[in-house]
Image (cartoon, rainbow, N blue to C red):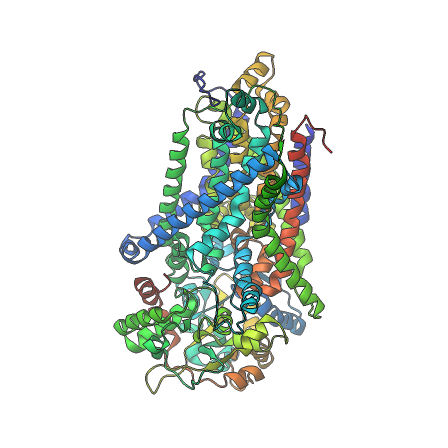
Amino acid sequence: MAVWRVVRPGGPRAVGAAWFGSALLIAAAALLPIVSLAWIAAGADGGHWRHLVDHVLPVALSNTVVLLCGVALIVTAVGTACAWLVTAYDFPGRRTLGWALLLPLAMPTYIVAYVYLDMLHPIGPVQGAIRWLLGYDSPRQFRLPDLRSMGGAIVLMGCVLYPYVYLTMRALFASQSRRLLEAARTLGEGRWGAFRRVAWPLARPALAVGLSLALLETLNDIGASEFLGINTLTVSIYSTWVTRSDLAAAAQIACAMLVAVAGLMVLEAHGRRHQRFGNTRNQDGMTPIRLQGAWAWGATVATAIPVVLGFVAPAAYLVVDVVQRLASGQHLTVNLYNGLRNSVGLALGVSALVVAGGLVVAWTDRRISAASPPSTWLTRAASVGYAVPGSVLAIGLLAPGLAIDRAWAWLTDAPGLPLMNFGAILVGACCIRFMAMSAGSIGAGLSRIAPEIEQSARLLGETHVGTLRRVHLPLLRPAIAVAALLVFVDAMKELPVTLLLRPMNFDTLATVLYGEAARGAYEEGALAALAIVLAGLLPVVWLARTQFTSHSPRKPAS
Amino acid sequence: MKPITRTLVATVLAALGATAVPASAQTAGEVTVYTTREPALIQPLLTAFTSRTGTKVNTVFVKDGLLERVKAEGDRSPADVLMTVDVGNLVDLVEGGVTQPVKSRELASAIPPQLRGADDQWFALSMRARVLYADKDLALKSLHYEDLADPRWKGKVCIRSGQHPYNTALVAALIAHDGEARTEQWLRGVKANLARKASGGDRDVARDILGGICDVGLANSYYVGQMKAAKEGTDARKWGDAIKVVRPTFDNPRSGTHVNISGAAVARHAPNQAGAVRLLEFLVSEPAQALYAQINFEYPVRKGVALDPIIGATIGELKIDSLQLADIARHRKQASVLVDKVGFDQ
């Protein structure tokens, strides 16, 4: 049994007022928009619920549940299987695939939806080729079923979102002690048994982090769902707010959804409340087993499929599109330089702030609650910004954000709205939005470091900050890198918060792309989409080179 | 400091510094536009305004939540002009208390009264018709919107989400013409005729007609111009070439084709109120109205401005429905509720 239970050590330990205060401030900032939403929600009577219960919720709720279950199944299976394959086995292309599996992260879901709709459309290349093979000349004689269906949406979102699970699972498997698995094997388990009974249960906190990110992304998606005609709860929030101009009622639905999400997360944490995950041994990576012959190529193909579906095919489509447009002499009208600069600047700034904030929150949480499950109330509160749709979060932030702005302007005697104009509100909103990724990843990373380590460091006279700096930070590097990567690529893709809270004359690649897409000219946005993808590639490659490879000390990095 | 901390701090400062927008509030004389219209559609017009008057125009393109943002900004809002599409959205701005009435002889003479808000709180700047795209080989000359519920179209109709403002406005017009009960029947009938889920955008109607998924569908008029004017060989051009356009009317002889608008209002706390009015006056001037027609393929609101030739040839002059825009705005919530009730998008 590799999951061991630790006797509750004593009560909360001091963490220092500065740390506790900062963590509290971050959590409070994250809760601000939610409180504001609840306030907005309180302004509506319940009259619209009659209509919702009668006509909207039954279908929207069941659609949402089916979509979430389907996506959960796909991302867990694909993400875990690929992470395990590239960690535990060696096969042709393993190194490349190890990082290539992350690439779909760089793809905005709604772009992938658009691309597949186009490729698989009756007049698209795929069905065209099939008709040519079968000898039909018109789509009216033969066509495949429409992608615009629940099944299509599940597969599509699964292909794009599995990297959240893959990433957290990979980081976990990579840092899992080889000895635990060897012990399991010595005790008579096969490779599969070692996975099922040791690696998998140990992976649960990491899976919870990755899966919840993927599912929240699914839940809060609006672009792809609209494309594919899937009416989820989020779509009903939109029609209530935008079409019926009933923001208060929309806020009520959003709050109800948030309560449900929070409930599920608490249940999940409750389910593993007695489990403690710690590892005091030195963290030798496992030595991958070299696969032979058909097995080896089978593994290559199996891990390549998600990369092709989630990244290579849509990226190739974008490239072909851009090249065709350039070749046909159409000039690209979009001012990409500004968009690129703003996107990268925003994403870098937000990632750095969010990583620092996540570290503060996760460490404080660990210190004040060393006995309870690793993810506790501070982390949960700070993570709440990811549990509501982006534009709903932005709406919730408008009132408190601008109140602060006015106060600031009054204090400094500045004209207008200085924080809004400077983009500070936008940056703050993005930080709130993405804090979950960082606090979650770092919290999960911390949970794998046994409390004994810090007890030893403290006994040797190190302060808690010194312990963090000299002991935990080096051990946490993979988790921090994962957090930074997730936040960076998501901030590159971020759309709804930027749209609502940006200063004047401020465009990011995502808003440029959306501006074209919203007027139906997706092809005009192809270059912006490609730029988002390319900018997202760099950190993925960097992460792969610095983190994943350096984690097998037995094999000198090549 | 540890290297990692230093790196973090340096990154934050560098990144935010690179991104930082000039913090200076707009200087006097500039006009700031908050718009839900896509930049590519209005930038040429704003550029023309700047080159004519020397007045710089700042823009913020917001999609959903324009009203909420302006409300929250209150009297410190930099917004001078609020620009959006769909009459319902304009009425929402007025009801949200973020607009002001405008006295301008220029605007009043250029824009017919039914295309202005009560008290001149908003102004239509361009029009678009909700027309029928049909397979180019289909023998169909005219149509009542009501006919789309006829079982003869079973499995042949494509349309975007019923909750999209373009569709709720049409449904609202149907309620005003035919009453709620008949409109509900109509929605059920159209829903039963759909060839695919009510989803995607207006151009998908043309694409799906080319793809053999459907024969007809409702969509906005300007996409026809965009698609048919697209370069030879592009996808958009292929979609555009696959369709012809029928101008539907409602099922009564005095009615015409359903039209929606793009429009603008002067913000209640506009720092540059005079500049805002000048911009609106420019937007309804003959050269700007011609740009609306030529670049965006929309129908001008000003009389005597020529249509784009492609729109003229494929759709032609409109017989605009007699219904007041205000009546349409009044029924749109009812329309949205009906769309949900019949499960139109399911």
Q: Nearer the viewer, residue B258 or B326?
A: B258
Quadrant for the C terminus of chain B, please.
bottom left
Vertical order, B115 against B168 (above or below): below
Q: Is residue A208 above or below residue A5?
A: below
Percent x, y of residue A372: 43, 24
Q: Nearer the viewer, residue A228 or B102?
A: A228
Total marks placed: 0
Quarter of the rendering containing residue B237: bottom right
- Residue under the image location 46 percent in, 54 percent down: A153
In the rendered image, residue B178, in percent from the top left (x then y), is placed at: 29, 77
Q: Nearer the viewer, residue A73 or A9?
A: A73
Confirm whether residue A126 shows in the render: yes
Q: Is residue A144 left or right of residue A414?
A: left
Residue B267 position in % (x across, y down): 49, 64
* Position of A550 relative to A517 (above/below): above
Q: Can you give x and y, in whole percent of width and height, for residue A349 in the image? A: 62, 43
Quarter of the image holding residue A270?
top left
Residue, far front? A293
* Residue A431 visible to an observer of this rendering: no
The quarter of the rendered structure image containing the N terminus of chain B is: top right
- Which quadrant of the figure has residue A73? top left
